[in-house]
Image: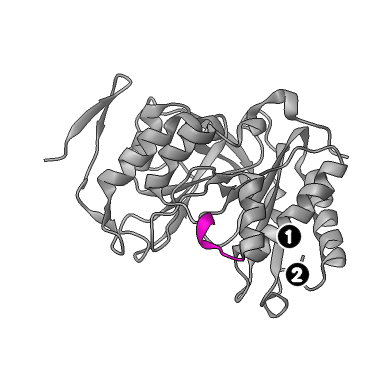
Amino acid sequence: MTPITEVEGRRLALSNLDKVLYPASGFTKGEMLHYYATAAGSLLAHLYNRPVSFLRFPDGPDGQRFFAKNVPPGTPAWVRTADVPRSDGTARQILVQDMATLMWAANLVTEFHTPQWQADAPGRADRLVLDLDPGAPATVVECCAAALWLRDRLAADGLHVCAKTSGSKGLHLLAPLEPTPSERVTAYAKELAVEAEQALPELVVHRMTRSLRPGKVFVDFSQNAASKTTAAPYTLRARPEPTVSTPVTWEEVEHCREAADPSPLVFRAPDIAPRLRLYGDLLGPLINLNRARPLP
């Protein structure tokens, strides 16, 4: 029988709690739900008011994966939604505004992905993102070297830059902005990627062409487009291990580059609660309006 749990006054049926989602470590669906509950305070702050796209993997990372943007059948009436403009009209997507909605959504077994804009201002980005993706044999070590150059370059334009692991192979750099049309942010991000390639030609590429990428870091600026999304801070990823997209300090980024060792920047679900106790939310500046700056 599926257990019924009450979360903030909402009754939720949480299913298959003993199901192993990550066979390499034995990490179960129940442990996934526990992780999301313990990280909720920080995760919800970054999901709030942003239409969520789900990357679902109900049978674990080795099973079928699929993106789901529309409100799924059976969604409780109390779950908030928002109209989202698309090229073919308007659709409704989920807003994860509270613990009950988070736990309902997590029960679907999903990654959480969000745009760089909020639901009441679609297409007006309040953050910039650069996705640093290493092409083998490059690793997150090379991403750290590129990240440090980009941090200084963005700082020269007056922007406050935060970093997080992607939870997969690379790094994400984020900077809070005064709301700006997404196409302007994308154009600025592309200029930065091109400039980084010119400054670091042995390290960075700004084009997605596969043949250019081995051993280099692809600076993906395209996720600033209004139609694109990025893995949210603190989301679990559909990887062999229950890795998490985790905020990191710049000291950790520098150490990774100097030590040439990617392992310290791999964080799993059990690592997150101790990090939150130690550092708090390292991406707090993203939701601090005082840190937002105009796009140069």
Q: Secondary structure at mark 1?
A: helix
Nearer the observer, 104 or 273: 273
Which class describes the residues within 10 Å of circle 1: few (<14), some (14-19), or many (20+)? Answer: many
2 shown above or below 147: above
239 shown above or below 77: below
- Identify the residue position indicated by label 2 in the image: 203
Q: Which mark is residue 146?
A: 1
274 shown above or below 194: above
The amino acid marked with disc number 2 is Leu
The answer to whether residue 105 is left or right of residue 158 is left
Quarter of the picture containing the N terminus is top left
Q: Magenta span has 264?
A: yes
Residue visible at 28% across and 48% down in the picture: 29
Residue 234 percent across, percent down from the top left? 49, 43
- Marks 2 and 1, how far apart at CA: 7 Å
Q: Which residues are magenta?
A: 260-265
